[in-house]
């Protein structure tokens, strides 16, 4: 058997002792044959049966079939590639390890699982998404192994063709294909390994390859113990003992199922919160009915237990008796001086928590639980549901994007029921989506004295049930006691708002989400939804209780592999291997308070520098991605490789005036753009004939296909993928300024050829000096200078833009976004008729012309307006009224300067119809008598066929809502916030005034 370097075994042993994970990269043709030896080292320090997750893409290097595997090992033994000892180790590996083989396309199945060893095969097929989904599954002390077959050094990775690059196929359909795909993401992957202390690169003969100086010093630099973990374990033990002395057996039982001190504290806080709510309810009931006995939460269950046939026990899990602070003997409080202040988190901490909640007897707070991935949030929610059952919250609804997202919640709800001595099939039943045991759980129902239920419900259905429109006819909301919304950051924000804002005051609501990690869109949640709930809740006296979990479940709190993964995938800029940065603010310099946009500078960021893996550029990248993550609904790690390697994607940043050139400036606003168009005519025409659409170039293909205009795809354009302002500098006009500067840049107004020439002259002079000093050729030195890492920030005056015809954007339409893009000169040209299943919004494409020649934008905007007017009665009828108006009209009011088109009017309106309109205006007819004329009148107005005319804010929307959207008057008035008793009369008066203005335009056409 090949001798194993002592640094390999030391890395494994120290990782197990410190509860930290370690990473191995194995290069060479026989890389997979080193896995059993690494497993054997890990098995020495971990006594439990080890779970192995083997991820692959093409085919397994080692067959999962025992017979095939045996024949393969025998061939290797006969060929001398495996000796007897290695054969024994390999056989033991497959005999004792619990191995799961997972294809990369099924990597989402790894979410929520825990393994001891993770193996990545087929490195070139690996994507950032797969890394994000699987990397955090490894337990503390475990191993992450990358098998780099057919490679003999890490340098060869820089030239490897990644399979993800096949998504950039649109490069081949362009007229010019000079842009080459870069391999920046893999290059950065390799360079970031230098910051990872628990990493070794070995070949297939177990020779350690030098990566950094840290590897040479590995024998002395690794800690063998995790002192922080020992301290946390001690505090956790003391906390449990304290709870056993001061609370009931029920509290202690649930705390015993907690994996961390954070989870245990959360359970105690939740017990105290429910007890406080029950106490305030009972107090309120007693005031309303002084003769009634006050019964606390759970007392009825305790009374039943005492009066029943079962003998009364001193401490029973079926009793909900809770020792309050007044009942705790003073001697039970530990006041030793050597104990930390935060260790005594018993009843006192619960009391302080309740004080911070500011709970009033008339309201039930909204609870938010925010945690990074791997902190045990779902497990805690499952235990909380069982606790709710003990407090007679009999009907609990659980909502999430899909049932698969809350399986851990249901599993730990069952754990909680088992703590209460419930038996499956007798005391509770489990319902699944199918008949198989692996099918997702959707409902748990108990069968004791009182039937209790915890069931999954789709977020959109729950929002409909909670809304005012459906509440009167909904049988669900009437009996719900608690609602839990898990992974709510992955649910459309408007849907969550509809649920939370319409929940009855007597219903307990808990919202939770993952704020960091692969499933991380919770940062946007914390900035937007929670801020809104806190503000609105304070206005109506309903507090927001914020709960968090910080300590990881699977590994040490200071696990360096988690920090490396956060660094590589930009998952959490506050927990990385390098210095943490605050969102939107560089660690080196702070911007003036809201500098004027005109004093700021827009830079193009060099992607070669941004993804170089250098410390300062890493901080800048984390700051950019932090702004994107906080401002956008859903972000994926794959977005990183798209930006890094695709030559058609670029990023711009707006920075304040730079006062110190030695420090990176803060970022006020960041914008990612993608070059589109320049497609070959033959490719476009052939695709349109066969109703096909190629990857990429979203706006070019959609507009060309929607309007059957192949020539549009031949024009060059730029799509704004995302634009976001730092939360520190919101509402400062920076986003609009970035868009105006981008327009000037692409029109060529900022490019300075003289400055570019001067820079080139200075570079050549420097190359000449170095060539004379070294004796090399000038061209060789010049190429070397240009090949160095460029400046991170490039002035737009030295960057030559592509000759594009338009700038566009696509987004899920909301009123705020639509108004923002309208203000910046963009006009809608396309709206998707069905909603996005994730966001619940219609996708809109908007364009702004860059150059006069080559693009007649009006033909697309006019056609869009005509189509939209007809679609508003059908697929788009559920658009909010104001959104529909802003799509049709750029201004707030309707002002028409055009002369009336007689032909258009006569095609829709007859002379006697004008008489009816006059009779309505003079109050001789009611509204129903002219209801049929409102649609053609609205069509004439919004298609600009009548004029001159000017309609006010409400009148224009009345005409749109009734005429084009077919809205009922009551619903229309609600959208216009006309809810007074005189609202109908106001609406009639405004409509009369609008029609009175239209009559002269119509009469002029009837006389011609």
Image (tube, grey):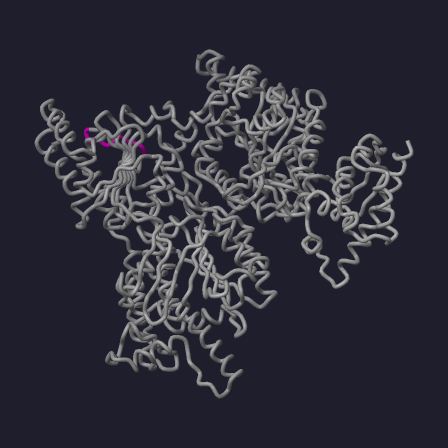
Left or right: residue 481 compared with residue 444: right
- Dominant SS of magenta comes to loop
Q: Residue furthest bottom?
A: 291
**Residue in the foreground of this view, choosing between 912 and 612:** 912
On the image, the x and y values in percent for residue 314 come to: 26, 79
Say whether residue 405 is left or right of residue 438: right
Residue 871 percent coordinates (x, y): 65, 38
How many numbered discs? 0
State the residue in front, 614 or 240: 240
The one of 522 and 919 positioned closer to us in this rendering: 919
Res 13 visible: yes
Magenta segment: does it hold 672?
Answer: no
Q: Tell me if residue 511 comes above or below residue 390 in the rendering.
A: above
Q: Is residue 334 visible?
A: no
Residue bounds of the magenta highlight:
205-212
Quarter of the picture containing the C terminus is: top right
Q: Residue at x 37, y 60 (%)?
A: 262
Judge left or right: residue 352 versus residue 947. Answer: left
Q: Residue furthest right?
A: 1007
The correct choice, above or below, for 934 with respect to 905 in the image is: below
Quadrant holding the N terminus? top left
Q: Nearer the viewer, residue 115 or 690?
A: 690
Q: Is residue 760 above or below residue 292?
A: above
Please say whether residue 209 is one of the residues in the magenta stretch: yes
Q: Position of residue 331 (x, y in %)?
A: 31, 81
> Residue 920 in the image: x percent, y percent?
84, 50
Quadrant of the rendered image containing residue 217: top left
* Residue ID at (71%, 27%): 859
Q: Is residue 49 above or below residue 509?
A: above
């Amino acid at each position: 058997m090949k001798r194993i370097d002592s640094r390999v075994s030391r890395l494994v042993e120290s990782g197990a002792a410190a509860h930290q994970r370690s990473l191995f990269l194995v290069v060479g043709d026989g890389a997979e044959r080193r896995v059993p030896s690494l497993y054997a080292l890990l098995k020495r320090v971990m006594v439990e049966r080890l779970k192995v997750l083997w991820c692959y893409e093409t085919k397994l290097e080692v067959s999962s079939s025992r017979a095939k595997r045996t024949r393969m090992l025998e061939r290797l033994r006969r060929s001398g590639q495996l000796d007897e000892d290695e054969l024994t180790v390999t056989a033991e590996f497959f005999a004792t390890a619990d191995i799961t083989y997972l294809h990369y396309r099924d990597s989402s199945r790894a979410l929520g699982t825990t393994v001891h060893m993770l193996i990545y095969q087929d490195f070139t097929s690996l994507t950032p998404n797969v890394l994000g989904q699987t990397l955090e599954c490894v337990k503390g002390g475990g191993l992450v192994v990358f098998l780099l077959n057919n490679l003999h050094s890490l340098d060869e990775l820089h030239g490897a063709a990644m399979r993800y690059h096949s998504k950039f196929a649109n490069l081949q359909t362009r007229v010019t294909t000079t842009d080459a795909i870069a391999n920046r993401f893999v290059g950065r992957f390799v360079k970031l390994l230098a910051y990872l202390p628990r990493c070794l690169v070995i070949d297939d003969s177990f020779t350690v390859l030098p990566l950094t100086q840290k590897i040479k010093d590995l024998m002395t630099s690794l800690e063998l113990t995790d002192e922080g973990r020992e301290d946390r374990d001690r505090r956790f033990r003391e906390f449990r003992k304290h709870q056993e002395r001061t609370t009931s057996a029920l509290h202690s039982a649930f705390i015993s199922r907690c994996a961390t001190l954070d989870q245990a504290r959360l359970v105690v806080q939740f017990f105290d919160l429910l007890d406080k709510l029950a106490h305030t309810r009972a107090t309120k009931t007693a005031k309303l009915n002084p003769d009634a006995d006050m019964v606390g939460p759970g007392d009825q269950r305790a009374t039943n237990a005492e009066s029943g046939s079962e003998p009364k026990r001193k401490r029973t899990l079926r009793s909900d008796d809770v020792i309050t602070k007044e009942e705790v003997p003073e001697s039970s409080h530990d006041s030793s001086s050597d104990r930390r202040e935060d260790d005594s988190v018993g009843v006192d901490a619960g009391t302080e928590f309740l004080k911070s909640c500011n709970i009033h007897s008339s309201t039930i707070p909204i609870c938010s639980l925010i945690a990074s991935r791997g902190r045990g949030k779902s497990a805690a929610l499952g235990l909380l549901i069982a606790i709710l059952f003990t407090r007679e919250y009999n009907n609990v609804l659980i909502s999430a994007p899909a049932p698969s997202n809350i399986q851990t919640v249901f599993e730990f709800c069952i754990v909680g029921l088992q703590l209460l001595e419930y038996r499956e099939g007798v005391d509770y039943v489990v319902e699944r989506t199918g008949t198989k045991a692996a099918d997702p759980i959707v409902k748990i129902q108990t069968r004791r004295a009182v039937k209790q239920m915890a069931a999954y419900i789709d977020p959109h259905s729950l929002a409909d049930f909670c809304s005012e429109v459906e509440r009167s006819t909904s049988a669900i909301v009437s009996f719900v006691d608690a609602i839990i919304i898990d992974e709510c950051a992955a649910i459309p924000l408007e849907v969550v708002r509809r649920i939370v804002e319409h929940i009855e005051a007597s219903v307990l609501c808990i919202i939770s989400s993952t704020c960091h990690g692969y499933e991380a869109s919770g940062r946007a949640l914390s900035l937007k939804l929670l801020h809104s709930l806190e503000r609105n809740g304070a206005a109506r006296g309903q507090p927001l209780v914020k709960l968090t979990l910080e300590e990881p479940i699977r590994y040490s709190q200071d696990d360096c592999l988690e920090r490396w993964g956060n660094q590589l995938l930009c998952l959490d800029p506050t927990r990385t291997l390098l210095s943490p940065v605050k969102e939107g603010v560089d660690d080196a310099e702070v911007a003036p308070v809201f500098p004027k946009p005109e004093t700021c500078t827009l830079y193009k960021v060099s992607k070669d520098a941004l993804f170089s893996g250098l410390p300062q550029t890493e901080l800048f990248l984390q700051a950019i991605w932090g702004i994107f993550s906080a401002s956008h609904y859903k972000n994926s790690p794959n977005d990183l490789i798209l930006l890094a390697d695709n030559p058609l994607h670029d990023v711009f940043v707006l920075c304040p005036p730079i006062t110190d050139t030695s420090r990176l400036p803060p970022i006020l606003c960041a914008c990612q753009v993608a070059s589109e168009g320049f497609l070959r005519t033959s490719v476009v025409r052939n695709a349109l004939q066969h109703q096909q659409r190629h990857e990429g170039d979203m706006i070019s293909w959609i507009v060309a296909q929607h309007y059957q205009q192949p020539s549009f795809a031949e024009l060059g354009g730029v799509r704004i993928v995302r634009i976001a302002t730092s939360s520190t500098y919101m509402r400062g006009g920076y986003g609009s300024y970035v868009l105006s500067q981008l327009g000037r840049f692409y029109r060529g107004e900022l490019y300075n050829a003289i400055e570019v020439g001067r820079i080139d002259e200075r570079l050549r002079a420097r190359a000449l000096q170095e060539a004379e000093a070294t004796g090399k050729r000038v061209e060789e030195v010049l190429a070397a200078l240009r090949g160095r890492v460029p400046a991170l920030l490039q002035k737009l005056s030295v960057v030559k833009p592509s000759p594009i015809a338009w700038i566009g954007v696509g987004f899920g339409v909301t009123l705020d976004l639509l108004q923002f893009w309208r203000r910046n000169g963009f006009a809608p040209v396309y709206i998707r008729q069905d909603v996005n299943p994730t966001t619940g919004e219609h996708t809109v494409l908007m364009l702004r012309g860059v150059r006069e020649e080559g693009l007649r934008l009006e033909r697309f905007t006019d056609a869009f307006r005509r189509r939209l007017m007809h679609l508003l009665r059908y697929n788009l009828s559920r658009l909010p009224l104001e959104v529909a108006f802003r799509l049709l009209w750029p201004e707030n009011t309707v002002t028409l300067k055009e002369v009336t088109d007689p032909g258009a009017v006569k095609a829709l309106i007859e002379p006697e119809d004008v008489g009816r309109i006059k009779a309505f205006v003079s109050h001789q007819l009611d509204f129903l008598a002219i209801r049929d004329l409102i649609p053609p009148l609205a069509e004439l107005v919004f298609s600009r066929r009548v004029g001159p005319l000017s309609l006010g804010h409400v009148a224009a929307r009345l005409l749109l809502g009734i005429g084009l959207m077919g809205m009922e008057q009551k619903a229309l008035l609600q959208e216009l916030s006309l809810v007074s008793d005189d609202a109908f009369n106001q609406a009639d008066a405004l409509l009369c005034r609008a029609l009175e203005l239209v009559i002269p335009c119509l009469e002029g056409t009837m006389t011609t």
